[in-house]
Amino acid sequence: MKKVTIDRRRFIKITSLSSGGLVIGFMLNGFPALASAPEECEFFQPNAYLKIDKKGKVTVYVAKQESGQGVDTALPMIVAEELEVDFKDVKAAIAPYGTLSEGAHDTGGSQSVLDMYSKLRNAGAVAKTMIIAAAATVWNIKPSSCAADNGEVVNTVTMQRINYGELVCEAAKLPVPKEVTLKSPKDFKLIGKSEKRSGLKDILTGKTKYSLDLKTTGMLYAVAARCPVLGGSLLSVDDAAAKKVPGVLKVISYKGTGAPMHVRSGVAVIATNTWAAIKGKELLNITWDEGKKNADSTEQLFKTFEEKAKQKPQFEVWNKGDVSSVNGKDEISASYAQPFLAHAAIEPVNFTASIKGDSCELWGGLQIPDWAVNTISAACGIKKENIKLNLALMGGSFGRRIHFDFAIECVKIAQQINKPVQLLWERTDDTMFSPYRPANYHQLKAVTDENGNLVSWQHHVLGTPIAYMTEGPESKSAPEMEGADRSFSYNIPHIRNGYTPVDFNINRGWLRSVDICVNTFPIESFMDEIAQKLNKDPLAFRLSLLENRPDFKTGDKPGSLTQSPARIAGVLKLAAHKIGWAETRKPNHYIGLATHSFIFAKAYAAHAIEIELLAPKKFRITRVVAAIDCGLVINPDGLLNQMEGGLAFALSQALKGEITVKNSRVLQDGYFGYEILQYDEMPPVSVHIVESSEEPGGVGEVGLSTVAPALCNALAAAGYRPRSLPISNEGFSWI
């Protein structure tokens, strides 16, 4: 058994999160535990993450923001495992904002399970230890003569049993233990077993409440018209016609903001219902001052990329060996391009705010709530301590709600109204004005020796950096290079990788699998091109550069992440095996492979995609095989959902996804202009999980990055190599 020391100073002071009095407890941010329990108790809440009521039912407070990725199931499973309770007796609830240390609610980068695994095991073990101690007190025996079993404590001498619910008041009187014993993973009963998503029936039947479902007394509704050019301002507005719409109460304007979270200048229509606000907005006559940065276009941007790609990178990101020493041998080069991309989240962006005097109450879904609260405080002139945030369930995000431009807007509107107001972004608004994944361009060059060995690799990444938006164009922050920096996994003697930023006047931000998607497509496509040029099997060629390479650190500082080429090779071989890479293929059937590591999330993935070529550049995806190694899997069903959903997301981007800009205006205007994969376009997929005893890693973003290159490599095997996304722009079609 593993001993874990619990420092009392790490635990948070607990007050009741619902009705009832104060209870003894701890939380994980440095507040002292309370000294005593109330005489009358309704539940036992030993820490911020869980409580047990008198019926033995357990509530797990989920710190990470649920947006469809299943953390409201996986995280409670961790608690239930250590607590030794039946999972049907466990329900999840959003951990109220302010009950945890700053940063605890942050959700992104596939970090939720990775970050919470140990914390929740400790939380469950402490609660179980205190419950057992309470039973020992009741029976007047030593705790060592007691055992936890399925929500009950068993007297191992007499075999008498007591339900946890009967012990909550006695447990609340006990001191928090300084040490707890964690279960050995070999004794896990729940972790590793599939559990259906919590509340799935309510989600499917429409009973689940999202932030858009919020209703509060006296609430009004708002929609907004925004300046079509980022950084522009309002000159004038004629709102006479809008005010004649029944239900419209008021029309107000607000100024935009700059870094760290860009908000466009806007005009908001306030009404008694959303429909009236929308109709009023349509009747506004607005004149905007577009400023001087109103001529940017994606057509010119990619021409700029091509010109700058001929020059040296502005930033040298990683050098290994001496690239110049191998000049003059066989050289292979290629360029790849990817467009701006939108999140296309399912739930329309929305937020609710109420201003009373110098106090502000907020309702909505936010992935990084502390950053949002701090920025709202600064941008809107409200003291942080006067802001109350109520977090809400999100109907999809994909990184969209890391950004909180909509929340700042809502507060700016609410400051001009003495009632709560709910701001809705229509689908068109979200497509045209959201932060986008940066457009990017890649110039790659490789050199092989006379024996067909890859000896030199150069990768010049050109992009529109996110840091320019959050920090300003003077930013010196590291560019988006993960996977192309020192985490690059292939063993090549000489490497030179660099980055050149190009500014552009639309908002950019984090979108699911940010850097990995950007860089895996060119790297894995180019690997295939090199193998083809050398007449080598693409699988064997990759494995020759991965196998027998030991793990290595990706930085020189303490805590630098460790790359595992062996685990990358493992998922690649698994995907190839499951799709029948070595088997004879049907006529006109072709297979493409791609692999990558998401070491930030301690996970590795590969895809193998088979296509049937129906005509030149016309194809059908006949099957997809995904392989993933993410350490110990908490909930296999949730992992499958993430991998399958990631495939749909990534195929949408590879086949169709594109945001285009003219005169600094986005041309797409919703799902009709920015298409996502339809049900009948989804190919058959099988997901294969590498069994592992490593601690759990993240899965939310891992299943995306290898989809596009695997598809493009299959098309290349058929004789047609796409080098830019979406492939529809290169004349490809599919059924």
Image (spheres, helix red, strand yellow):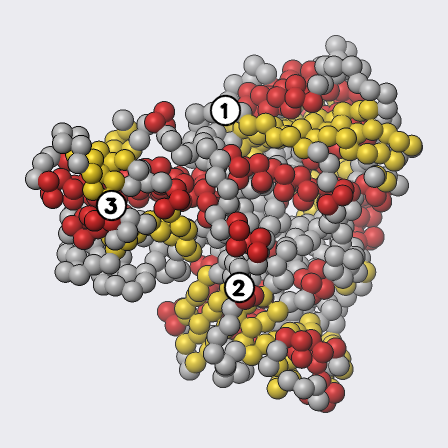
Q: Farthest residue toward the right?
A: 616
| Residue beneath the point at 65% across and 53% down | 343
Pick the residue in front: 227 or 418: 418
Pick the residue in front: 414 or 396: 396
Give coordinates of residue 31: x percent, y percent: 25, 55
Pick the residue in front: 299 or 282: 282
In the picture, the quarter occupied by the C terminus is: top right
Q: Which mark is residue 8?
A: none
Mark 2 sits on what residue?
211
In three-dimensional space, the C-alpha distance between marks 3 and 1, rounded to whole angstroms, equals 34 Å
Q: Is residue 75 visible?
A: yes
Q: Farthest residue toward the left?
A: 140
| Residue beneath the point at 63% across and 41% down | 646
- Please, what secondary structure does the residue beneath circle 3 have? helix
Q: Quadrant of residue 574?
A: top right
For disc 3, the neighbor class at 10 Å (few under 14, some 14 to 19, many from 20) is many
Mark 3 sits on what residue?
164
Three-letter residue code for mark 2: Ser
* Sequence-first disc among 2 and 1: 2
